[in-house]
Image (cartoon, rainbow, N blue to C red):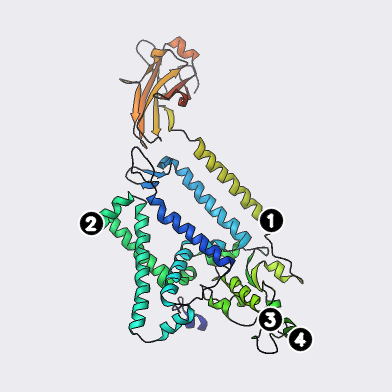
Amino acid sequence: MQTGLEEQLGLYQKRIPIFTRSVKGRFRRFKTTVLALAYAIYFLAPWLPWSRLDAPAQAVLFDLPGRRFLIFGLTVYPQDVIWLALLLFIAAILLFFVTGLVGRAFCGYFCFQTLWTDFFIWIEHTIQGERPARVRLYRQPWDREKVLKVGGTHALWLLASFWTGMTFVAYFTYAPQLVLDFFSGQANAAAYITVSILTVSTYAAAGLMREQICTYVCPYGRFQSVMYEPETLAVHYDAKRGEAAHGRASARAGQRTLAERREKGFGDCVDCGLCVQVCPAGIDIRDGLQYKCISCGLCIDACNTIMDSFGFPRGLIRYDSERNLASPEPAAPKIEWKRLKTIGYGVALILMSAYLVYSIGSRGSYDRTVNQIRQPLYVVLSNGDIRNRYQIHITNKAAQDQTYVISANGVPAGALDLGNFRQITVKPGHSGLVQASVRLPPALAARTQHFELVITPLGKPAEARSETVRFDAPGIRP
């Protein structure tokens, strides 16, 4: 049975529009810098040229038909799935590491929802004006001004959403050709479906739902508390300083200076409400740490602006830890990283990143495996010779066709039988299978327990690789 409060609130609250006020400050500048950099990477990467012999001249291309990812000079094949696993592990550890140090900094500055919502708010502000003008426009009846401004805002939102979807699809095909085919009606049906879905979802998430995505859809805000520690830096309101003995009060005559406010027992907060007006989540940070807070720091910029205007010290709202705020005399906030959990995250992050770099840097142009066919382990021929069979599996990771020569060390030259060929040509990203057999006289077979199969790319002797394999014969225990 639901409680009265649950019946009143329900599982989903109807969205109340939030009209944010623009603000200047270091956190706003940082958010703008991250947004510009992220957009430049996302929207420009598919258009960067990159010379390729067997693929379109595109720097980043996810070639699904060819079963490969082309990222500048690196070609990633399905066989390199370990890299994806490492990337996911590194991303998770990095998120835990950063959250343990500075809270939801990822949400405030780097999350896709934050980046697109921030851009959509900028479009809204550019067309409809500052917060008071947008509030007035929202409340006024529909007229020519409202239709033009609101309609223009939604039109630009849809355009930005559409190009977001187009850019995503451009990562999977040659971008210039995609644009020509798309607008001429010759593109693949999958392109139209994907662009349509992403256009609608981006428009809904960044334009219509906004903070509700963070509140009701994204799980991170819900479980972030388990990663917080007393030393974690997060956006906090210094209640002891802001409230003092008699709470916060507006800066009327007789309570404008610090001395006057101290005398009357008022805190430094002048109750201007600017911290609430700039918050994209619509929360009041003065109510304490909340799961809706994305730690974007805009309320810090707003509060510092007011503090500067009155000549009060900055930092009434700041990044700080619960432990420092609870101390009798809070010190200057700093990142507390000397904790077992944080150090563990950092070590894991360094080790996995180093291994990923090493794995990418040390990868050869091909992979090979040699498996002995063990049923039967050996065959005794009519003349007494002993024969073992092997499967040689070669995967070409180069960007062009490659021919491989197969030879053997440790057995006579004529002992290795590869059928009618001694070499195999494999296409990029594909694999080739060679059936091989080694035949030895009984006396030599009794003395030969191991030998080497050597695989050499044609014309590249420096890349020759050998695999030591076992030779089984009667009387030799496997």
Q: Give the vertical position of 122 relative to 252 (above or below).
A: above
Instruction: Determine which residue is flagged by label 3.
Output: 243
Residue 339 numbered mark, or none: 1
One can see residue 188 in this view: no
Q: Earlier in the sequence, mark 1 or mark 3?
A: 3
* Residue 436 x, y percent position in the rendering: 37, 23
Quadrant position of residue 398: top left
Q: CA distance from mark 2 to mark 3?
A: 64 Å
Gap in angstroms between the C-alphas marked 1 and 3: 32 Å
User: Which residue is under mark 4?
Assistant: 263
The crowd level at tag 3 (other Cα within 10 Å; few <14, some 14-19, many 20+) is: some
Mark 4 vs mark 3, foreground winner is: 4
Image position of 96 (left or right of 38): right
- Three-letter residue code for mark 4: Glu
Viewer-nearest of discs 2 and 1: 2
Kindly check if marks 4 and 2 are in contact, taking CB atoms under 8 A apart as contact.
Answer: no
> Disc 4 or 3, which lies upstream in sequence?
3
Which mark identifies residue 184? Answer: 2
Does residue 290 lie above or below 60 as drawn? Answer: below
Sequence-first disc among 2 and 3: 2
- Can you give x and y, in whole percent of width and height, for residue 186 in the image? 23, 54
In the structure shown, which secondary structural element does the residue marked by tag 1 occupy? loop
Which of the numbered marks, if any, corresponds to residue 95?
none
Mark in the foreground, 1 or 4: 4
Query: Disc 2 and disc 1: Cα gap in Å?
Result: 59 Å
Residue 321 position by quadrant: bottom right
Cα–Cα gap, marks 4 and 3: 14 Å
- Looking at the rendered structure, the secondary structure element under dot 2 is helix
